[in-house]
Amino acid sequence: MSNLQQRVITAICLAAGLLVVLFVLPPRAAALAFAALAALAAWEWAGLMRQGSPARVMYAFVLLLFCWQIQVAAPELIAVLLVMAAIFWILIVPLWLVRKWTLSGNDFFGYLIGFLVILPTWAALLQLHASSPWLLLAVMALVWVADIAAYFSGRRFGKHKLAPAISPGKTWEGVGGAVLGVVLYGGTLMTFAPLAFSLPWLLLVAGLLLLTAVSIAGDLFESLLKRQAGLKDSSALLPGHGGVLDRIDSLTSTLPLAALLLQLAR
């Protein structure tokens, strides 16, 4: 089977699985699916830290315990996780990308950063899905629109490299395409499928620009970690697509911030 065939089959399975989780499974089963996704991402994160199989499994298990305890015993911590994620992606990650900090092997700091990346993503999935599966899908689609628009505009017009030492294929022209695509997407969504609240256009555009920026930051952040670890993909769990972190890199930065902004807007 060719790599293209693998990519297509995997993409179809992922899309079907996502729709089943969002619209078919009961809330408790969907929450279990989100926790399983977080555990797989944690397993891959420990791999980026060059840990062996026992440490990777243990890290995934510990993260699952945190998910369980937060959901059943301390749901109020979800808001705290979202705020912490916003601070991390808006203030810390830009510095990380500029200074090219690295994850050390078997380092408490590295494991802590992994929790800061993965746990808020899980929390945002729970919160957005509880509000509306359509809302969660709309936020995820925003990231996909940004990625697709950046890819095609970068290929057509790309001349100025965005971060050549981290991801040589990304350009400023691609960023411009992503911004335009997301603004058009947001405007279309608010026009034809308005959410349960209304926002002034200026605030809406500002929020979309911020989400686009952190989406790109999430992509660059994982690209930097993989490059430093000497890996092409975070794992081989998804044939033709790499690993879970490869598929949710931009979502790890965008979903928590989107959940926080939507919470503040209500």
Image (tube, grey):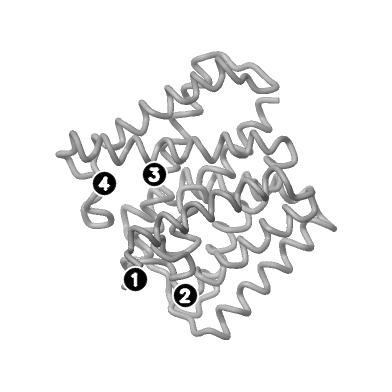
Location of residue 100 by image quarter:
bottom left
Q: Secondary structure at mark 4?
A: strand
Q: Secondary structure at mark 2?
A: helix
> Looking at the image, is mark 3 or mark 1 nearer the viewer?
1
* Residue 124 drawn at (x, y percent): 64, 46
Q: Which residue is mark 1?
A: 231
Amino acid type assigned to the residue bearing label 2 in the image:
Gly
Gap between marks 1 and 4 measured at Cα? 18 Å
Which one is earlier in the sequence, the residue at label 3 or at label 1?
3
Q: Secondary structure at mark 3?
A: helix
Closer-to-camera residue (139/26): 26
Q: Are marks 3 and 2 in contact (CB under 8 Å)?
A: no
184 in relation to 223, above or below: above
Q: Are marks 3 and 4 in contact (CB under 8 Å)?
A: yes
Decide: few, some or many residues near mark 4? Use Cα within 10 Å; few <14, some 14-19, many ≥20.
Answer: many
Gap between marks 4 and 2 measured at Cα? 25 Å
Does residue 177 appear to the left or right of 110 in the view shown?
left
Q: Which residue is mark 4?
A: 170
* Residue 54 drawn at (x, y percent): 57, 86
Q: Which residue is mark 3?
A: 216
Instruction: Find residue 47 and name its label.
Output: 2
Amino acid type assigned to the residue bearing label 1 in the image:
Leu
Amino acid type assigned to the residue bearing label 3 in the image:
Ile
Location of residue 177 by image quarter:
top left
Which one is earlier in the sequence, the residue at label 3 or at label 4?
4
* Residue 239 drawn at (x, y percent): 43, 66
Amino acid type assigned to the residue bearing label 4 in the image:
Lys
